[in-house]
Image: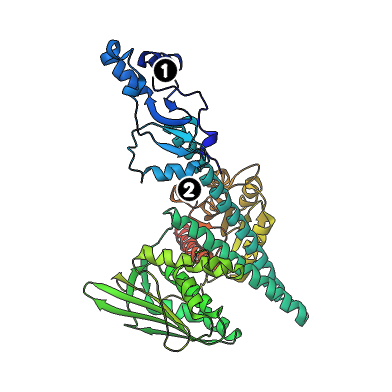
Amino acid sequence: METLSRLIDHRAPISPATPCGQVAALFDAEPALPALAVVEGAAPVGLVYRDVLKGMMRVAGETLATQPIANVMDPEPRIVAADLDANAFVMALAESPTPIHRSAYVAVDGAGRYLGVGGLSSLLESHGRRQREARDAMALVERMAVDVGAHLNGVMAITERLEHQRLTPDASAFVRAIGDTSRDMGETLSRAVDLHRSAQGQLTFKLAPMRLRDLADAIEARWAPRAQEGGSMLLVSYDGDPECGVEADGDRLLQVFDILIENALACGRGLIEARLTARAEGAKIRLDGQVRDNTEGHLEERLARVRDPLSAVSLRDHSELAHCVGVALAHRIMRAMGGPLAAEPNRGAGLTVGFSLSVAPAAAVEAQEAEPAVAGRAAHILIVDDNATNRMVAEALCDMFECTSEQAVDGVEAIEMARGGRFDLILMDIKMPRMDGIAATRAIREMSGRPARTPIVALTANADPADVQTYIAAGMQDVVEKPIKPERLAVVLSALLSDEDDQDAESGHEAAA
């Protein structure tokens, strides 16, 4: 903690009887001196501000020169304890009745004795520096979280491949446990990063047409098997027009249901009901979502944890930390969407947690496929990444989508391998030694024939709008953010490989003509 004692000037004060002309001379001798404290005995009785006194001397210098400084000093200066946290002091300034234009303060010890004087400009500069350091530290933590998530993604890809091997029952159980633990850790990290982004006002939402029945189906497909494995039963219901479409962020809504269902499952075995209701309300659609459970447990503790998940009491139990982070994120998401979460105890056992929000209707929405289909033919893909784990993850996903693949470790290798034109698509990392992904993409686009037309997809943890524009300008067709989500990669591959089939067909017709 940085206290004010480190920021003040421990200079000798002046007495109330000191002539104004003498004080003005002190300011002339030290242009950087913002103020001088006036002390009687050991206690501060006033403060003289450099700019104020200099202005008064310009107007009435001859008259004031011999008068005591007590006649023009500020008799009610800002007096603060020297051991006060500097950051807390800055935050308190906005609530202080003392005018902010008073550009200095007097620091005292615990007994009220004078210790020194400080300028608000240096204090604000220190506060700004600490804020920048905090932002830099959080940016580093967020970057590390993304990197750890990518490694966990690699662990899950490896365990998935191991599960298809002939293993002993014990080995299979260990592999599943490793995969489940990695998945849970990755989910917790992702939620923690989202929670931090929401606190900074940087949580992103992507509104798009979605069919509510598809959301209910996705919830059931994702959670019914896991509930059954844990000895519980999940019932998912949708009450509304089967074809009702709305403009909303389906991924965020699914994320909220994930958190609420996961939280209910963590409280013990029982029956869990996830309900989604849609009703026309004027020109809008009223969307109600609920997760109700009848699990036993300490009802008051559960209510407190859901209503205030980041309180000291909620975070006291370290085993509940991941759930508290999740519930806190769900609160932030729904508050941003306009439908805050509410929790109420059931008449019997358990809780009901839900939300209600108003959303705009959407035009006809195509039904989502249960599983993403990549293409109607086997594709051959070049994976370019300097990280072996990332290459393994991408290779496993290509295998999942029945695509063959080869690997390159940097942009130089990618260019040489792409010259033959044997790849249907290239997955390109951005930051690599020797040659980065952007330079490699530009070099491939300068080739002739089929290699120059090969679709290139950026694989990167940096997918801000400005970054995406840079990748597209370099000649890439799309971006898949790391850690790679299979469903996102499937959508991109399906679209680009289908487009390539159409282009090849057109090229064939032109050649025949």
Position of 155 with respect to 477 (left or right) is right
Percent across and percent down for residue 279 are: 28, 79
Percent across and percent down for residue 48 are: 38, 25
- Secondary structure category for the residue under label 2: helix
Q: Check the image and report above or below for 61 versus 213.
A: above
Q: CA distance from mark 2 to mark 1?
A: 51 Å
Q: Check the image and report above or below for 351 versus 506.
A: below
Percent across and percent down for residue 288 are: 35, 77
Contact flag, marks 2 and 1 (Cβ < 8 Å) = no
Q: Residues within 10 Å of mark 2 (few under 14, many from 20)?
A: few
- Secondary structure category for the residue under label 1: helix
Percent across and percent down for residue 189 are: 57, 62
Q: Check the image and report above or below for 74 versus 483.
A: above
Q: Which mark is residue 467?
A: 2
Which of marks 1 and 2 precedes in the sequence? 1
Is 242 or 233 nearer to us in this picture? 233
Is 25 or 254 nearer to us in this picture? 25
Residue pointed to by mark 1: 27
Position of 488 with respect to 420 (left or right) is left
Q: Residues within 10 Å of mark 1 (few under 14, many from 20)?
A: some
Question: Can residue 5 be seen in the rendering of this structure?
Answer: yes
Q: Residue furthest right?
A: 168
Q: Residue at x 46, y 35 (%)?
A: 123
Image quarter in which the C terminus is found: bottom left
Is 5 or 284 nearer to us in this picture? 5
